[in-house]
């Protein structure tokens, strides 16, 4: 069992509704072992010999709704429970328990055990545990139904998809995971590192040369001159002057040699640095492109559920700015870091080899800086992560309001939107201020420490020169090195900032990458040729969080049949259709196409057989021809035109200034709703699907346009299995069968006339629509049905 | 009758009002037809639709090569008369300002200048062509960017 859900242990959860169930459930010991440590002993202590565990649920609120860990255990004989660890356990034989039901509302959940005449007990829990409470209620239902292995369908023996649980990666460790993307460019990276090494080595040469320059050339010459001046004899003077000249010429030559070597080494360091920078920038550009591609490709595979919970702007920020940060980290910071470490180590080695005492003086501030870095690191990461979130929030506002600009203007909310944007910018400022305070303190502090180090070196060096331990040349060389050393140290401390930034970014990226696709690809895919389009929904249930959206729906659709789904908002129509399309997988039961579970088809291959026309047709940025050919990019012009003709779109397309080459925007601004809808119908027609889904295809347009679309739809529907959802019942007249859904259950099935005659739910809906239509004085029935039961929350899942 | 044969049999002429009259293979005539390129950029010489005055398609010519020479000449003349899409031969200069840009170009219809309101109004066409749409909706084509002179290419590179 996962660590994140310790309160829910459903016995044999691994094999729900399969033939394995019975076997696993009898193995009490094994299921007990799945419980976390303290709970396992408690539960095991409760069971009588031979009693088998069915489900364990831990309510987390007591009867006064205060937090408290309770325990409810369901076995094959009894229901055991206690509200708090302090009170004694109560037990009811199953014969006394009529029903166990779980409900939740507004964050509070209740699990009730009902007897034949009264409520036996009730336990409260927070909504996070609602799923577990339902599991227990379900386990009770199965127990009450006396499930036998024979009831179970062998077709159901499919791997049930794992839920999407993002693993939280450790912070800086997520940076190491980037190496997965670096692997493809090992050669270039090695070359870059080699160049870095060469550049570093070349960079160490010039200061080293100052030592012999001072001690072997300048000092001896100066001494010599002084010596000569002190000897005042005129006879020696001529010889002395000549020797000085000789000495000077030789000195100059040596100075020349050292300076040329100096310049040469500097030049070499520059060339190598350039090459290294270029190579590594090249690699990092590719790595970050890989990273973007991988993230985006993975994003495409995630379920609709994921997109439902994430804001567009946040995802955009993750793929654009976070990868950019990682790119700059890889190209600049990482390389600098390697160069810095090499330089520091190299310098330290050289310094120690020249003079250990001075070296020790130089390095004395190093531990303080290291300590400071470690100390501030966590605060920095935290701050940058916070800043990243604030940034994502701001881009989310952009991504919200720019597509919704018409609503903003219609309600004259420009000012408020600007204020909202301003407020989120304030949050960015606040988040960044906090982190800026830390790093702006940090860098000058490092600079100060370096000055202190320099002071110490001067003090120690002067003392050593006076005591004759080192020459002036050594001290000069030291000071030349120290400049570089401290510059490196400072840039390394800057690196701490950038590393934390990149770590925060890669953490945000891996949050996406670690998420498994919502609907998993089958392990043993069954390939489909041409499908006939027989759909069977077999006892399907679907739960959205704790809400049961589809509850045991069974429906058989013959090839070529048209089914109209009818029901109030929230009845589960869209969800049922999404299950058929496999945007979601059923929680229980199965959806079969031509007798095979849809979960065993490769997803892309399966969807190629499904055409979908949605309420709000989405046109991508591109030409009309591209939009029609979206599902079949290799389509010929003849196919595109044929599809457009059938969809009654050809002639209006010809009237556009660029015909099929006209550009349509993100939301197809230049086209009317009906035109866009007909393009999306052409899109569905082009892939020649065996199964067709019409999700409120005509509800966003006026009656005249609807008529045109209806013609196009009639062409589309012909010979295909169709499931159509419509609020306007009149549009479903020619459906072969109407299926009335309510609260995720099928309440009626039949033809329009029969259902109307039967006077059931459908007749009610139809009457209500007609009456409302008349009351409003409109010749057509209203689009929306009045919600039959106001206590349902939210829209269609 | 195949599309090809139908196309070869059609006949185009102008009537006394200067309207285009098409006579189909089956002898039917429609006057006042307008030739429309369905794919003006991606396939300018294919998929020419003849629409009547109300916008209904009378005939769709998939390939102009199927037409008789005479009809082809008439149709081409009619199409070029109906289309104003100057081809840019040289970009003289571009003046940026206030989110829009003023373009001074040499085109096959003479020197002109126009205003682009957004960078989105420059788009690639095919592998190396480009299309510019000015603030009035007039289209300017560049058939091949690589064949332009170096100055024009340099200017375009900032936008494409």
Image (spheres, coloured by chain):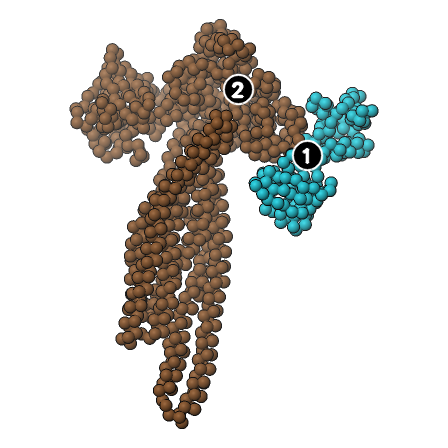
Whether residue A165 is situated above or below residue A451 in the rendered picture: above
Residue A68 lies, in percent from the top left, at 22, 28
Residue A30 seen in the current view: no
> Which residue is identified by label 2?
A699
Q: Nearer the viewer, residue A429 or A674?
A: A429
* Point 28% across, 32% down: residue: A6
> Which residue is identified by label 1?
B40
Q: Which quarter of the picture shows residue A307?
A: top left
Whether residue A550 is situated above or below residue A760 in the rendered picture: below
Asked whether disc 1 touches disc 2, contact meaning CB atoms under 8 Å apart, the reply is: no
Q: Which mark is residue B7?
A: none
Q: Mark 1, chain letter?
A: B
Q: What hue does chain A carry in this figure?
A: brown
Residue A73 lies, in percent from the top left, at 25, 24
Q: Secondary structure at mark 1?
A: loop
Residue B82 lies, in percent from the top left, at 73, 32
Give the residue at the far bottom of this rendering.
A235
Please state if A237 lies on the left or on the right of B21 as rendered: left
Please state if A84 lies on the left or on the right of A435 as rendered: left
Q: Nearer the viewer, residue A538 or A273?
A: A273
Whether residue A34 is situated above or below residue A112 in the rendered picture: below
Circle 2 residues within 10 Å: few <14, some 14–19, many ≥20: some
State which chain is coloured cyan.
B
Q: Secondary structure at mark 2?
A: loop
Marks 1 and 2 sit apart, C-alpha to C-alpha, by 33 Å
* Point 48% across, 16% down: residue: A784
* Point 17% across, 27% down: residue: A86
Q: Mark 2, chain letter?
A: A
């Amino acid at each position: 069992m996962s660590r994140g859900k310790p309160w829910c242990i459903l016995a044999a959860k691994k094999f729900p509704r399969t033939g394995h169930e019975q076997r696993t459930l009898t193995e009490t010991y094994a299921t007990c072992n799945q419980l976390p440590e303290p709970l396992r002993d408690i539960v095991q202590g409760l069971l009588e010999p031979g009693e088998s565990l069915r489900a364990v649920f831990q309510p987390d609120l007591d009867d006064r709704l205060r937090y408290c860990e309770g325990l409810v255990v369901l076995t094959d004989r009894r229901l055991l429970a206690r509200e708090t660890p302090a009170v004694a356990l109560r037990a009811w034989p199953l014969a006394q328990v009529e029903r166990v039901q779980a409900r939740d509302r507004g964050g509070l959940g209740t699990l009730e055990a009902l007897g034949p005449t009264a409520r036996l007990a009730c336990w409260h829990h927070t909504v996070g545990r609602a799923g577990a409470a339902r599991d227990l209620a379900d386990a009770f239902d199965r127990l009450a139904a006396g499930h036998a292995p024979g009831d179970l369908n062998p077709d159901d023996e499919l791997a049930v998809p794992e839920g999407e649980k993002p693993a939280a990666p450790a912070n800086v460790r997520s940076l190491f995971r980037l190496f997965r993307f670096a692997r493809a460019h090992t050669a270039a990276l090695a070359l870059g590192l080699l160049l870095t090494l060469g550049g570093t080595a070349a960079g160490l040469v010039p200061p080293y040369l100052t030592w012999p320059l001072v001690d072997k050339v300048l000092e001896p010459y100066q001494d010599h001159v002084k010596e000569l001046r002190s000897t005042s004899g005129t006879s020696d003077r001529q010889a002395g002057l000549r020797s000085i000249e000789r000495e000077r010429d030789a000195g100059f030559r040596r100075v020349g040699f050292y300076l040329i070597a100096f310049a040469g080494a500097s030049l070499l360091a520059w060339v190598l640095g350039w090459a290294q920078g270029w190579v590594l920038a090249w690699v990092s550009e590719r790595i970050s492109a890989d990273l973007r591609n991988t993230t985006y490709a993975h994003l495409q595979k995630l379920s609709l559920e994921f997109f439902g919970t994430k804001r567009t702007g946040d995802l955009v920020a993750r793929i654009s700015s976070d990868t950019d940060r990682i790119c700059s980290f890889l190209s600049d910071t990482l390389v600098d870091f390697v160069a810095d470490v090499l330089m520091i180590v190299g310098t330290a080695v050289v310094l120690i080899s020249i003079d250990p005492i001075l070296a020790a003086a130089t390095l004395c501030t190093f531990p303080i800086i290291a300590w400071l870095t470690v100390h501030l690191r966590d605060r920095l990461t935290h701050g940058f992560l916070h800043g990243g979130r604030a940034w994502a929030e701001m881009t989310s506002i952009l991504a919200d309001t720019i597509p919704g600009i018409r609503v903003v203007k219609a309600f004259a909310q420009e000012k408020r939107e600007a204020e909202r944007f301003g407020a989120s910018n304030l949050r960015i400022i606040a988040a960044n201020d906090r982190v800026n305070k830390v790093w702006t303190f940090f860098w000058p502090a490092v600079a100060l420490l370096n000055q202190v180090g320099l002071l110490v070196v001067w003090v120690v060096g002067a003392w050593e020169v006076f005591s004759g331990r080192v020459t002036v040349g050594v001290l000069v060389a030291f000071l030349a090195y120290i400049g570089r050393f401290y510059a490196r140290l400072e840039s390394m401390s800057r690196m701490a900032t950038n590393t934390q930034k990149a770590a925060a970014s890669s953490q945000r990226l891996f949050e996406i990458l670690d998420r498994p696709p919502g609907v998993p690809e089958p392990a043993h895919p069954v390939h489909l040729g041409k499908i006939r389009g027989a759909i069977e929904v077999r006892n399907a249930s679907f739960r959205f969080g704790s809400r049961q959206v589809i509850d045991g729906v069974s429906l058989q659709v013959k090839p070529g049949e048209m089914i109209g789904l009818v029901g109030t908002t929230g009845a589960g129509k869209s969800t049922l259709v999404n299950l058929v399309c496999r945007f979601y997988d059923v929680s229980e039961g199965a959806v079969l196409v031509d007798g095979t579970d849809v979960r065993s088809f490769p997803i892309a291959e399966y969807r190629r057989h499904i055409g979908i026309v949605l309420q709000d047709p989405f046109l991508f940025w591109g030409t009309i021809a591209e939009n029609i050919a979206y599902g079949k990019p290799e389509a010929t012009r003849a196919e595109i035109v044929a599809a457009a003709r059938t969809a009654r779109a050809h002639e209006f397309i010809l009237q556009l200034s660029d015909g099929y080459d006209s550009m349509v925007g993100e939301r197809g601004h230049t086209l009317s709703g009906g035109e866009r809808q007909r393009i999306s119908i052409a899109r569905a027609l082009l892939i020649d699907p065996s199964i067709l889904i019409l999700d409120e295809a005509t509800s966003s347009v006026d009656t005249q346009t609807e008529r045109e679309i209806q013609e196009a739809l009639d062409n589309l529907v012909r010979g295909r299995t169709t499931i159509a959802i419509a609020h306007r019942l009149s549009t479903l007249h020619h459906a072969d069968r109407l299926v009335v859904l309510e609260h995720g259950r099928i309440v009626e099935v039949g033809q329009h006339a029969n259902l109307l005659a039967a006077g059931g739910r459908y007749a009610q809906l139809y009457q209500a629509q007609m009456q409302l239509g008349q009351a409003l004085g409109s010749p057509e029935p209203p689009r929306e049905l009045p919600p039959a039961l106001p206590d349902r929350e939210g829209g269609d899942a | 009758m195949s599309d090809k044969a139908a196309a070869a049999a059609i006949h185009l002429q102008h009537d006394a009002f200067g309207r285009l009259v098409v006579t189909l293979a089956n002898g039917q005539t429609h006057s006042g037809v307008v030739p429309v390129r369905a794919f003006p950029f991606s396939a300018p010489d294919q998929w020419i639709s003849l629409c009547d005055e109300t916008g209904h398609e009378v005939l769709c010519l998939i390939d102009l090569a199927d037409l008789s020479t005479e009809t082809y000449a008439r149709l081409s003349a009619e199409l070029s008369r109906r289309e104003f899409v100057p081809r840019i031969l040289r970009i003289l200069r571009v003046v940026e300002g206030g989110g829009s840009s003023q373009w001074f170009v040499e085109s096959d219809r003479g020197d002109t200048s126009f205003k682009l309101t957004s960078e989105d109004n420059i788009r690639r066409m095919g592998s190396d062509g480009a299309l510019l749409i000015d603030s009035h909706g007039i289209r300017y084509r560049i058939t091949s960017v690589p064949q332009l002179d170096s100055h024009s290419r340099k200017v375009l590179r900032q936008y494409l």
